[in-house]
Amino acid sequence: MDVSEFQDSFFEEVGELLEGMEAQLLALDLAQPDPEQLNAIFRAAHSIKGGAGTFGFEAMQRTTHLLENLLDAARRGELALRRDIVDTFLETKDMLGDQLGAYRQGREPDSQALARICAVLQRLADEEIGATGSGKTGASRDTKPAAEKSSAKKAASGKSSAGKSSEKKNPKAPAPVDEQAERCDGYRVTLLGVSDKDRDLLIEELGRLGRIDSQRRDGDRHEVVLASSESAADIEAVMCFVVEPEQLKIEALVTPPQAIAEPAAGSAVETRAVKTEAPTLAPPVAGDAPGAAHMSHAQAESSLRVPVTKVDHIINLVGELIITQSMLNQVVGKLEGAAKAGLVAGIDLLERNARDLQEAVMSVRMVPMDHVFSRFPRLVRDLAAKFNKSVELVTRGQSTELDKSLTEQIMDPLTHLVRNSLDHGIEHPDAREAAGKPRTGVLTLSAEHQGGNIVIEVSDDGAGLNRERILAKARERGMGVSDAMSDEEVWQLIFAPGFSTAAQVSDVSGRGVGMDVVKRNIEGLGGHVEVLSRAGQGTTTRVVLPLTLAILDGMSIRVGRETFILPVSCVVESLQPRAGDLHGTVGDDLLLKVREDYLPIVAVHQVLGVSGACTDATRAIAVVVQGRGRRYALLVDELVGQQQVVVKNLETNYRKVPGVSAATIMGDGSVALILDVNDLGQLGANRKEIGIPADNPVMPTSHRSPSHESRCIH
Amino acid sequence: MNPVASTDAGAGNQQFLVFSLGEEEYAIDILKVQEIRDYAHVTRISNAPDFIKGVANLRGVIVPIVDLRIKFRLESAEYNANTVVIVVNVGRRVIGIVVDRVSDVMTLTAEQRKPAPEFGVGLPLDYIHGLGDLGERMLILVDIEKLLTSREMALVDEAGESRAA
């Protein structure tokens, strides 16, 4: 097998272990650290060290070794944790992350950084360990085993692969086995004239039955000393599958296996060390010994690590299945005769099953928002320290699920929002006190499902947006604003490119490159951003995103002889314009009056150059859509129906097409283009000067929210 | 990963797929060809050059379809029973090209492959590997990858390319 495969899984493991370590470090109560948490942190460092040793990643091994020693001292109460010590640990975690990145790319990590962090950790160890006084003589006694252990581990990781795999197959065994071993329930298993290949297999099997304490080879005779609670008959039964009875000899050992175990046998030394030094210690530490592959054992039982490409492939196949199924649907619809009823019933069932399958497969891609939120405690902690602010982070709805690809892409926008809140939103403690608020500000991250969308909110209880300052700034920049603008419209101004009201530009935010990028990113994902703010009470930024990018609720429309798909989420309503509601403006542009609003009309056949379409607006259908802060009416020939479509990227083999976001495959196997409502609006605006200043991002909209409450499907 | 290298190996023989555009016979490296299919169900793309007929569904993959006859300004570009789409793999992309007829697969020896002429034969010289000399017949050897990824084909936009990379 390829070592690089193991390496990749090791890298993933380390990534997760580091994340876990960070989360635990941040959650630590410094005054009264939870021993379980300390153990968990220690185990993470320990596992990383073991794996790093196996793969020969020396820098990582050295760093984790020093860290492990410190953590070991901490969990035994010899190192009193302080905030700065935790900071150092966090810094070390970051350094390990950097090292991981370097190893991933096949580079050696930065040696200067390594030297620096090692020096810091070493100094910490020299200065702090035992300083609490509780260590007494124990300090010197106890730090030693740790070092000893690590060398033992090195030896262990260098052992034969058979030995390693035997250990990893049986992570739970050591604790009970140990006790058994003390009671001399060991065996000497002798293999006679067994081929090398079979022997390795057998030794591996033995490893599953217990712990291999030593092996000795003498010609074609191979002796294995095994500590096991199984009976000799059981062991023989297992071995019989491979060898003849005469090739196998099993003797029970009367003496404890430790006595005959060679001192160099790493695992024996190690298990003993763990046993003696901390009887209360959770047994996994012993099981956590060398090798990266088995680190995932505990998770492996309940979950499966699968490359995203495999899942995507399945999703594609299921997409194909859905398309085939709708193809069948269409054919069956045209059928006549007695057999039809049965066929229709069968097809219906197939349809339901296919949908269920699709949903189930899509759910594989869904990950809880926890993945996203878990990055923020650290960020908030660091930034709060930087700005001398006191901030409490509250997260809600961590279990809300979201497509994995989306979680990756909303990371940056959310980080921006959180930084903004910390920098500009939440005030300094003194200012808060003066305003009659608690000194500690609260930053809330929340997520919830709403229909087919996920709503993520970043709220703070800070000063809120300053309407006057925003308006002043907008005027300064020559944007067309008036005092009569509603709060919502004013808040939208902060999304204008280069807009910043920050009195001081900090290195975190305030350069005005943030919000417009946030808005653009979110819109690129098919979502939108809203801001709610009240002076003195705080600001909430609400990000609404579709749950997945792979499937879309689409409304198929016909223009001329061509079919297009409109995302249902953009559709507000549709209606047949009456001549009286159509108002011409300069040129041949039209405005459509919908209740109180005048909406610009964008004719699909015009912007997309479709021939043979209905050009008389009163005979066409106007679909009112909401795009990029502006609402307008799309003129189409006919609404065909509503269906879920599988989104296919056009840019895989082609390029970006103006006005089109992607493509999909219809039931008859033909390709239909999915319209990009934002882009179409722009196309329409560019094509003809609509009677609205194009630089005004906000159209005066009605009081109704831009949802799809009144939708009519024909 | 370089198919050309593998066919160049050996006695310098290389296999080509031969197709016609109007009166001319063209040939492309067979290893670039994924499959040959009928011309059907092509969805028009707005605001694209006329030689890009649109996109088609190739077993779940959206593939752009280019009519080389229009690109090379042939007099007629009819769609009849012989009209086929050669689906080629260029770079990481899958693209369909519409041609009048696919005739055969031929192995050309190094001697049969002549350098490109000094003057044009309907398409810019950049995209011509050389000429295939078969006595009576002359094949124009097209570097299909270079042709389809060229800027003037407008099949690939730089922004999209960098995103895909």
Image: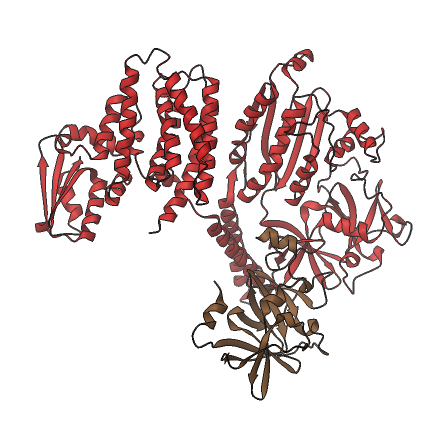
Chain colours: A red, B brown
Q: Which residue lies furthest to the bottom in this view?
A: B136
* Horizontal arrangement in the rendering, residue A416 relative to residue A691 (left or right): left
Q: In this view, does A64 lie to the left or right of B161?
A: left
Which percent across, then down, holds residue B83? 63, 77
Residue occupying image coordinates x 63% and y 33%: A416
Front-lying residue, A655 or B129: B129
Q: In this view, does A283 lie to the left or right of A57?
A: left
**A348, A564: nearer the viewer:** A564
How far across and how far down the image is residue A190, in percent?
Answer: 11, 44
Residue A473, picture quadrant: top right
Residue A33 in the image: above or below residue A508: above
Nearer to the camera, A219 or A612: A219
A554 horizontally vs A475: left or right: left
List x then y, in percent, for residue A454: 60, 38
> Which residue does the image show at 27% across and 43% down from the upper left?
A165
Residue A27 seen in this snapshot: no
Query: In the rendering, at what x and y percent does residue A261 appear?
Result: 15, 34
Q: Can residue A323 be seen in this view?
A: yes
Total numbered circles: 0
